[in-house]
Image (cartoon, rainbow, N blue to C red):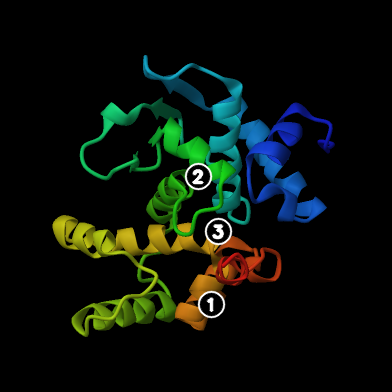
């Protein structure tokens, strides 16, 4: 068992928005997962990124949220993680996953999105959701995932905005795949679970089952926080 005086625990307490909201058991799962992930994965840093253990810890902690409830063996298939700068990607990309062996993540976005809770923005969650999907074929695997996508497409046809940004639809069209939808709703689930619950409750229930976390009961409602600050 890793205690909360462990360097990873101390760092996450101050630099990862979700960590203080997790139960003690959930924190232990994250810490054990992260420690093993860091031991077994090679981290590479492009010249614009200063190598640090802390960046690796953030990647591993987010990977733990995605893979902690699954038989992923701490994502043992992920052999290489590249922490890169802004110049590594074209357009709006902040990361990519190549099958289940290699993940690239914009280090600046990783830090910002880990420190500040931003609805639908956590690139490490997004890319490890792709890895999980590559391992288990989760896209379109439940009625709620299929129905939620159809609801989003119907909203688009009727000019109705919802929690899914246009870039997700555009990426699905460009790549002729629905995988982007699962990864993006996973980002929302971990940053704004009430948003998913309000958008389509069955989808929220399926994500709870997939990830083993009922975060709407643990995290404050972002929308309520916004209203209270006006």
Q: Nearer the viewer, mark 3 or mark 2?
A: 2
Residue at the spot 61% in from the left edge and 66% down from the top edge? 225
When the figure is inspected, residue 118 is found, relative to residue 141, above or below; the finding is: above
Instruction: Identify the secondary structure beneath mark 1.
Output: helix
Distance of label 2 from label 1 (alpha carbons): 21 Å
User: Mark 1 Cα within 10 Å, few/some/many (few <14, many 20+)?
Assistant: some
Q: Is residue 155 visible?
A: yes
In the rendering, at what x and y percent does residue 33 appear? Answer: 66, 40
Q: Is residue 203 left or right of residue 116?
A: left
Instruction: Identify the secondary structure beneath mark 3.
Output: helix
Instruction: Identify the secondary structure beneath mark 2.
Output: helix
In the rendering, at what x and y percent does residue 114 appear? Answer: 55, 43
Q: Nearer the viewer, residue 112 or 202?
A: 112
> Residue 197, labelled with which disc?
1
Distance of label 3 from label 1 (alpha carbons): 12 Å
Q: Nearer the viewer, residue 161 or 11?
A: 161
User: Mark 2 Cα within 10 Å, few/some/many (few <14, many 20+)?
Assistant: many
Mark 2 near mark 1, Cβ–Cβ under 8 Å? no
In the rendering, at what x and y percent does residue 204 appear? Answer: 53, 74
Residue that mark 2 sits on: 113
User: Mark 3 Cα within 10 Å, few/some/many (few <14, many 20+)?
Assistant: many
Residue that mark 3 sits on: 190
């Amino acid at each position: 068992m890793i205690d909360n005086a462990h360097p990873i625990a101390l760092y996450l307490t101050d630099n990862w928005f979700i960590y203080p909201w997790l139960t003690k058991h959930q924190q232990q799962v994250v810490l054990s997962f992260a420690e093993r992930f860091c031991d077994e994965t090679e981290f590479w840093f492009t010249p614009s990124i200063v190598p640090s253990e802390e960046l690796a810890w953030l990647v591993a902690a987010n990977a733990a949220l995605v893979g902690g409830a699954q038989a992923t063996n701490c994502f043992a298939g992920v052999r290489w993680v590249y922490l890169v700068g802004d110049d590594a990607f074209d357009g709006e990309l902040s990361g990519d996953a190549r099958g289940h062996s290699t993940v690239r993540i914009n280090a600046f976005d990783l830090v910002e999105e880990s420190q500040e809770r931003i609805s639908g923005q956590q690139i490490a969650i997004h890319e490890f959701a792709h890895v999980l999907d590559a391992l288990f074929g989760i896209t379109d695997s439940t009625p709620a995932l299929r129905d939620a996508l159809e609801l989003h497409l119907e909203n688009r046809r009727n000019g109705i905005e919802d929690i899914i940004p246009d870039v997700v639809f555009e990426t699905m069209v460009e790549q002729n795949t629905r995988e982007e939808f699962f990864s993006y709703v996973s980002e929302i689930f971990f940053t704004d679970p009430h948003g998913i619950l309000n958008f389509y409750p069955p989808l929220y229930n399926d994500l709870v089952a997939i990830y083993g976390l009922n975060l709407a009961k643990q995290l404050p409602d972002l929308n309520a926080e916004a209203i209270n600050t006006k």
